[in-house]
Amino acid sequence: MLTIVALLSVNQSLTVAVRDPYTLSKAKKKYGSTEGDHITLLNIYNLWQAKKQEGQKIGFAREMKMNHRALEQVQ
């Protein structure tokens, strides 16, 4: 629960503005949860955190259309 609260209380936006809605829906489909947006965010954060190298974390955040700096702030 603390991670979800941290995800919701970040000063910056967690997502990156995307003009193409297909790109965002593709990312949500891949790691989304039917239990809701909070669990989807938690899933994406946990997968981001599991990456070992900084380059992998940045690449994963880009793929998921997430703000890498905001994810670091959550951590």
Image (cartoon, grey):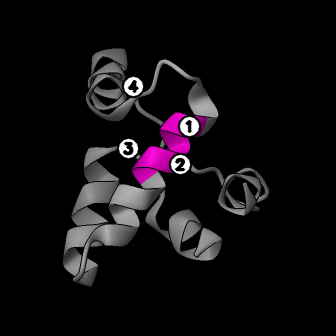
| Number of numbered discs | 4
Mark 4 lies on residue = 19
Please say if 28 is above or below 72: above
Q: CA distance from mark 2 to mark 3?
A: 15 Å
Dot 2: few (<14), some (14–19), or many (≥20) neighbours within 10 Å? some
The secondary structure type at the circle numbered 3 is: loop
Magenta residues, dominant SS class = helix
Q: Quadrant of the C terminus?
A: bottom right
Span colored in magenta = 39-44
Disc 3 residue type (three-letter) = Lys
Location of residue 7 in the rendering, given as x and y in whole percent from the top left corner: 67, 55
- Residue 13 lies in the magenta stretch: no
Residues at marks 1 and 2 touching, judged by CB atoms closer than 8 Å: yes
Describe residue 73's horizontal placement relative to residue 20 as left or right.
right
The secondary structure type at the circle numbered 4 is: loop
Give the mark nearest the N terminus, 4 or 3: 4
Q: CA distance from mark 1 to mark 3?
A: 16 Å
Task: Report the front residue among 6 and 10.
Answer: 6
Mark 1 lies on residue = 39
* Residue 65: mark: 3
Q: Residue at x 45, y 26 (%)?
A: 33
Task: Report the front residue among 61 and 46.
Answer: 46
Mark in front: 2 vs 3: 2
